[in-house]
């Protein structure tokens, strides 16, 4: 079987069905607003956004693998690069940079300069505890879990809270060995 | 063309929003879940309409505004226009999209179960029943969008959806007198 050549983020993005980003941004914004009204507690909103992201991530990984032709990454460093350069590009049309690696290569930061989730958004003072983009961290966690990586994804910097960039820390907790449900002779 | 994102991002957040409201927050109160989903759509419709209608002159009558929704507004959202517009000239408009983008991923069972309740036992919700319920919950979102957009144009109305003909979807707009 011919080996499929991994495609660049730009090439994949050019080939997926795309929609006007305003629809996405405003829909997400309306959801967050409604969640704040209904759930009242900012912490609970953070939790629900993360959960929604996780549920999206476990489905999105299939589309990602099918369309990007990315094959198994040799290590977590490659995984992080693929998320930053292909994953973000393919879905959100932007790329992230990867920095702040720890010594054993299990934790790094993804930095987003552009973030389509936050156009038109300002965070009122009373909601400073809100992780507005928490759906993103959930997506990454969910998607990685489907390819056997347990991770912890946390926001380190958030421009809505006055920082100079969006920074997500992705920490690999453990790599779950794949278990095949079938035997060789079946 | 402005900035774009993958269609699956929009699909993903809408699906998850509907499922969060229907199965987590208001699992036993579908009418409350429906109202919230509609409210989210309403806000999106209002804001989008505000942006898309910004540079236009005022509409002279309801039909002009509805035509704007069918053509310009729908094209911004779905890259196609509404396929068929009917009206009784007494404040009711039917906007039909022959292949509504957001329904193309739903199964046909949803519609048939919707139309023919006699075939299934109402006491035990079947998979089709559930699918039909999920689809109708999901439709509160685009209905809310249309209602929000028209309200923004100064036309208060009620909007419902009819999907007896999947993947076609008809939105029925009743303008409030």
Image: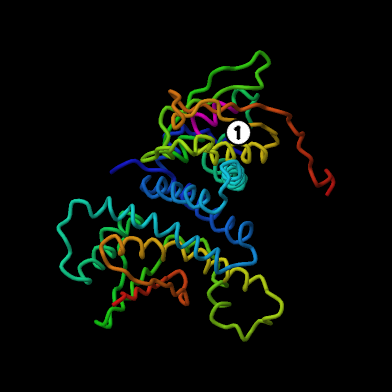
The residue closer to the viewer here, A62 or A162, is A162
User: Magenta stretch mostly in which secondary structure?
Assistant: helix
Eyeballing the image, is A160 above or below B53? above
The residue closer to the viewer here, B88 or B39, is B39
User: Where residue A1 sits: x, y (%)?
Assistant: 61, 39
The answer for which chain carries disc 1 is: A
User: Where residue B172 sits: x, y (%)?
Assistant: 37, 74
Q: Describe the element under mark 1 as helix, strand or loop.
A: loop
- Using residue A145 as the reference point, say whether residue B19 is left or right of it: left
Q: Is residue A82 magenta?
A: yes
Q: Which quadrant of the figure has residue B22?
A: bottom right
Where does the N terminus of chain B fall, quadrant-wise? Answer: top left
The residue closer to the viewer here, B123 or A63, is B123
Q: Which quadrant of the figure has residue A82?
A: top right
Q: Is residue B103 magenta?
A: no
Eyeballing the image, is B136 above or below B87? above
At x 47%, y 64%, the residue is B103
At x 43%, y 72%, the residue is B161
User: Where residue A123 sits: x, y (%)?
Assistant: 43, 37
At x 57%, y 72%, the residue is B109
Q: Which quadrant of the figure has residue B122?
A: bottom right
Q: Which residue is mark 1?
A: A71
User: Where residue B28 sits: x, y (%)?
Assistant: 65, 66
At x 58%, y 26%, the residue is A169
Q: Which residues are magenta?
A: A79-86
Eyeballing the image, is A147 above or below B25? above
Eyeballing the image, is B74 above or below A65? below
Where does the C terminus of chain B fall, quadrant-wise? Answer: bottom left
């Amino acid at each position: 079987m011919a080996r499929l050549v991994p495609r660049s983020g730009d090439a994949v993005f050019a080939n997926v069905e795309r929609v006007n980003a305003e629809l996405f941004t405003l829909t997400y914004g309306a959801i967050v607003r409604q969640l704040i009204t209904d759930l009242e507690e900012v912490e609970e909103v953070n939790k629900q956004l993360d959960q929604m992201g996780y549920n999206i991530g476990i489905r999105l990984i299939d589309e990602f693998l099918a369309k990007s032709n990315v094959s198994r990454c040799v290590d977590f460093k490659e995984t992080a690069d693929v998320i930053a350069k292909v994953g973000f590009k393919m879905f959100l049309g932007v790329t992230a940079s990867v920095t702040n690696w720890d010594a054993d290569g299990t934790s790094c930061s993804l930095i987003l300069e552009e973030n389509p989730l936050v156009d038109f958004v300002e965070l009122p003072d009373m909601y400073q505890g809100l992780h507005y983009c928490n759906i993103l961290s959930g997506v990454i966690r969910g998607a990685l879990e489907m390819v056997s990586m347990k991770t912890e994804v946390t926001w380190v910097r958030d421009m809505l809270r006055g920082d100079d960039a969006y920074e997500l820390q992705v920490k690999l907790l453990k790599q779950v060995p794949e278990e095949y449900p079938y035997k060789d002779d079946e | 063309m402005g900035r774009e994102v993958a269609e699956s991002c929009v699909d993903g957040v809408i699906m998850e929003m509907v499922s969060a409201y229907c199965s987590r927050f208001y699992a036993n109160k579908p009418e409350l879940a429906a109202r919230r989903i509609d409210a989210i759509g309403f806000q999106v419709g209002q804001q989008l309409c505000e942006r898309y209608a910004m540079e236009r002159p005022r509409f002279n009558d309801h039909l002009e505004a509805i035509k704007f929704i069918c053509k310009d507004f729908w094209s911004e959202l779905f890259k196609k226009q509404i396929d068929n517009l009917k009206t009784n000239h007494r404040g009711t408009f039917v906007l039909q999209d022959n292949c509504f983008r957001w329904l193309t991923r739903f199964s046909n069972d949803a519609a048939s179960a919707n139309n023919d309740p006699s075939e299934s036992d109402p006491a035990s919700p079947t998979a089709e029943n559930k699918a039909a319920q999920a689809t109708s919950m999901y439709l509160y979102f685009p209905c809310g969008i249309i209602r929000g957009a028209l309200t923004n144009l100064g036309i208060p109305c009620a909007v419902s959806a009819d999907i007896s003909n999947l993947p076609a979807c008809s939105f029925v707009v009743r303008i409030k007198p």
